[in-house]
Amino acid sequence: MEDKMSVLRDLQAQRNDVVGKLKRIEDKKASVSAEVYEKVKKEYADKLKGIDDELSGHIDLLTEEIQRLKDQEDVAVQSMKETKFKMEEVELRYSIGEYDEASFKKAKREGDARMSQLDGELRKIQENIQYYSAIMKGKEPEPAKPVHKQPVERDTELKIDEHILEEKLPEEEVALEELLSEEDAVKPEAITDSPGESGAAEDKGVACPKCGHSNTADSWYCEKCGAEILGASGSS
């Protein structure tokens, strides 16, 4: 069994080497011609495909390796939990004066280093599980996508704004608006009728005692027949 697993380890090492070279090729893309870049990239992409094809032929080994990695994952998670509890205990004992400053700092450094080590091991284990699982499914492993809240659609917000802008005014405001409009419409007529009102006042002048013609109030003689008005009105 160990000999079979060594085949798997060797293939994995080859694959890691090819993937690393592909990344470096990508980094150098801007410094070489497109023809050279495409040629070398294709060469290593073909090598990677060949390794993946060979790996996919060892389904039994992949299954065993995935199970072994999952067991390691459980151990790493448990170790991280225990280390975390231990660090919390150290902090509590330090807070009540059981540890001096130097002892506390030393224990904290050791705890932080252990947590960092376990975190790195756990990440590597999970990457390998994802990688082998993807090989068994016949596709490249995909990085886990972060979960995001569903974004608010801008179109929806815009429709809401337009709806608010298009809302009708309350009945009282509509009535006031109509009243103001009517008042604006009446104003020109009022201006036009002003001379008529002064004319009406002029029509109320003194009537001629002889012919009855209406004359202005300050007229001395009738504008029509020439008869004396003021003298006549004064005598009456």
Image (tube, helix red, strand yellow):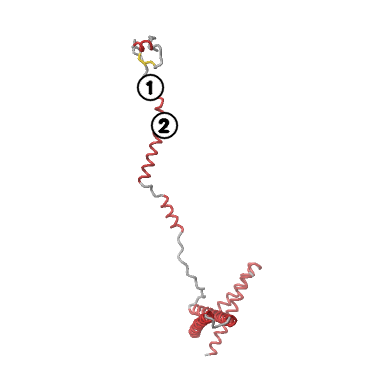
Q: Tell me if 84 is positioned left or right of 42 in this view.
A: left
Q: Nearer the viewer, residue 99 or 8?
A: 99
Q: Residue 112 location in percent, x, y? A: 56, 79
Q: Tell me if 150 is positioned left or right of 233 in this view.
A: right
Q: Secondary structure at mark 1?
A: helix
Q: Is residue 57 in view?
A: no
Say few, some or many: other residues with alpha carbon within 10 Å of mark 2 (under 14 / 14 to 19 / 20 or more): few
Q: Amino acid at mark 1?
A: Ala
Residue 110's disc number: none
The part of the image, by quadrant, that contains residue 45 is bottom right
Q: Quadrant of the C terminus?
A: top left
Q: Residue 228 location in percent, x, y? A: 38, 9
User: Which callout, 2 or 1, points at the residue further toward the start of the chain?
Assistant: 2
Q: Tell me if 139 is positioned left or right of 206 in this view.
A: right
Q: Nearer the viewer, residue 96 or 70?
A: 96
Give the Cα separation between the discs numbered 2 and 1.
21 Å
Residue at mark 2? 188
**Up-down: is 12 above or below 173?**
below
Q: Residue 120 location in percent, x, y? A: 55, 79
Q: Amino acid at mark 2?
A: Pro
Residue at mark 1? 201
Find the residue positioned furthest to the front: 97
The part of the image, by quadrant, that contains residue 9 is bottom right
Say few, some or many: other residues with alpha carbon within 10 Å of mark 1 (under 14 / 14 to 19 / 20 or more): few
Q: Residue 143 location in percent, x, y? A: 52, 73
Q: Secondary structure at mark 2?
A: helix
Q: Is residue 235 in view?
A: yes
**Up-down: is 192 above or below 123?**
above
State how many labels appear: 2
Point 40% across, 35% down: residue: 185
